Amino acid sequence: MNVISGIQITGSALTAEKTRMDIVAQNIANAQTTKGADGKPYHRKVVSFETLMNGSAPGAPAGGVQVASVTDDPTPGPMVYNPGHPDADSKGMVAMPNVNLAYEMVDLISSTRGYEANLAVVRNAKQMAHKALTIGH
Amino acid sequence: MIDKLFNDPTYAMSKAMLDVTTQRHEALAANIANVNTPGYHRVDVSSTFTDELQKQFKAGHPDAASARANIVATDPTAGSVRSDGNNVQLDQELLQMGSNEMQYETLTEFVSDSLAQLKTAIKGQVT
C-alpha cells in the first residue's frame, strides 16, 4: 500500500526520461569526436523504452517504464575533407560522428516534456493523498 | 448498531468509488509514464467493470464489485495510433487525470461531510 498512489510508476518514468536526457547530453558532447576507444568515430546512442509489467499474470495492468536498451545508431557519419586533421586518411578525408544536432534537440525537448508531464502526475497524486488524509477534518 | 452507520449504502458506495478513482489514477500515471514507449497501448478502467459496478450498486451491493480484480484493462476505444504504435495522447491523459482528481476530491468531501453529520447526531449539537 502506498500513500501516494502510482508513485513507483511515475518514479520509473522520471528515471527513464532522465536516462534519455543523459544519452542526448552524451551525443551532443561527442558531436565532434572522431576517435573513440575503439579507434572509430563516435556513433550516436539511441535509447529505447519498454513497459515494466505490473505482476506476471497475462493481461495484468501496465506498470512503469524502463530503459530497454541503449544501442548505437549504425548509419555512417559524413566524410569531411580536412587534411590537417590527425585522424585524416591518406586522401585527407575525416570520418565524422553521425550525430545530428537537430535530432538530439528534438529528443531533448520530447524527454523534457515527458519529464514535466510526470511531475504533473506527482503533484496530482500528492493532492489526492492530501485529500484522503484530511477525511473527517 | 454502529456497523449500520458505516454500512450506509451511499457511504459504502463512496468508499468503493474512492478505490476505483485511485486505480484510475494509477492507470493514467502508467499511460503518462509510457508516453515515449514504442508500441504501448493506453490502459483505463474497463467499461465492463464500470457497467458491473453500476449493476451491483443498483442491486444494493455497493461493496461487492470493488473487490474484483482486473479493473484496469487496455482501452479498446483509443484511436490515433502514432507511427511508433503508441496511442497515448499526453494532453488527453492530463485532462482525464485532472477530472479524476476532482472526482476524488468530491468523494472525500462527501465522506467527510457524512462523518460530520454523524458527529452532529452523536453530540446532539452543531459543532
Image (cartoon, coloured by chain):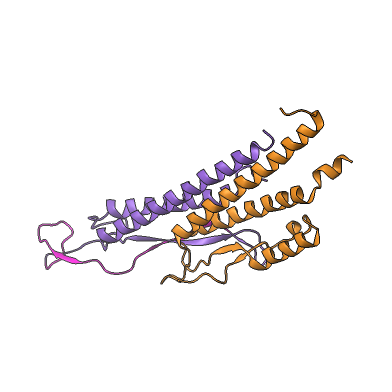
Chain colours: A purple, B orange
Could you tell me which residue is drawn at 27 percent across and 69 percent down?
A: A76
Decide if residue A70 is on the left or right side of residue B28.
left
Decide if residue A47 is on the left or right side of residue A52.
left
Q: Position of residue A48 (x, y in %)?
A: 44, 62
Residue at far front of view: B125
Could you tell me which residue is drawn at 85 percent across and 43 percent down?
A: B3
Which image quadrant: the N terminus of chain B?
A: top right
Q: Position of residue A4 (x, y in %)?
A: 60, 44
Q: Position of residue A22 (x, y in %)?
A: 38, 50
Please tell me whether residue B110 is drawn above or below residue A46 in the rendered image: above
Residue A64: say if magenta.
yes
Q: Nearer the viewer, residue A65 or A97?
A: A65
Decide if residue B84 is on the left or right side of residue A35.
right
Residue B10 in sight in this render: yes
Residue A78: say if magenta.
yes
What stretch of residues is rendered in magenta? A63-91
